[in-house]
Amino acid sequence: MGKRDPTTPMNRRKIALLLLIPTLGDTFEQVSRNVSITMMPPSISQIMRSSVVIFTAVLAVVFLKRKLYRHHYVSLVGVCLGLSLVALSSFLAGSDSGSTIVASLLALGIMLQLLGSFF
């Protein structure tokens, strides 16, 4: 008697709104990653996708109150160093051509890739 019928229009609307939130997040992630691929080489794009490990660890600590141990932190530092080296090497390789437009597009592509990894 106290249960609500899930087929009522109000419940359908709530369910649709709840499904809309992750859908929009996933759409934003896919669009930002696809746009970033046009701004940088695909190899750098694939390496930058590994940043999802860092965001997952941060969100697990913040929202799930998980505790990270020393080996987790060591691996996260390794991933950060790897991402930093890839980004730095791509900037140094791009600076050989002398074009500031290429460097700014590369920076924008890396930022879009990292932003997409967050979602």
Image (cartoon, helix red, strand yellow):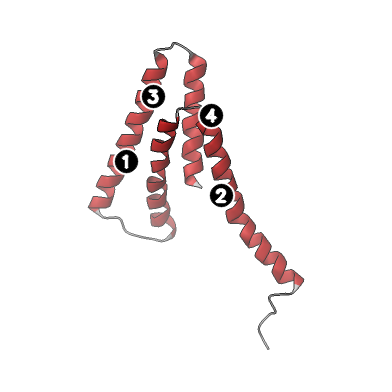
As measured in the structure, the alpha-carbon distance from the residue carrying label 2 to the one carrying label 4 is: 19 Å
Residue at x-position 49% and y-position 15%: 100
- Residue where numbered disc 2 is placed: 26
Give the mark, 3 or 4, whose residue is nearer the N terminus.
4
- Residue where numbered disc 1 is placed: 79
As measured in the structure, the alpha-carbon distance from the residue carrying label 4 to the one carrying label 1 is: 24 Å
Kind of residue at disc 3: Ser
Q: Position of residue 87 (x, y in %)?
A: 38, 29
Instruction: Give the number of marks.
Output: 4
Camera-side mark, 2 or 4:
4
Residue at x-position 67% and y-position 60%: 17
Residues at marks 1 and 2 touching, judged by CB atoms closer than 8 Å: no
**Quadrant in the rendering for residue 83:** top left
Q: Position of residue 32 (x, y in %)?
A: 55, 38
- Give SS at disc 1: helix
- Give SS at disc 3: helix
Residues at marks 2 and 3 touching, judged by CB atoms closer than 8 Å: no
- Please name whichever residue, 106 or 61, is drawn nearer the observer in this view of the structure: 106
Camera-side mark, 1 or 2:
2
Residues at marks 2 and 4 touching, judged by CB atoms closer than 8 Å: no
Q: Which numbered dot is residue 29? A: none
Camera-side mark, 3 or 1:
3
Residue at x-position 66% and y-position 66%: 15
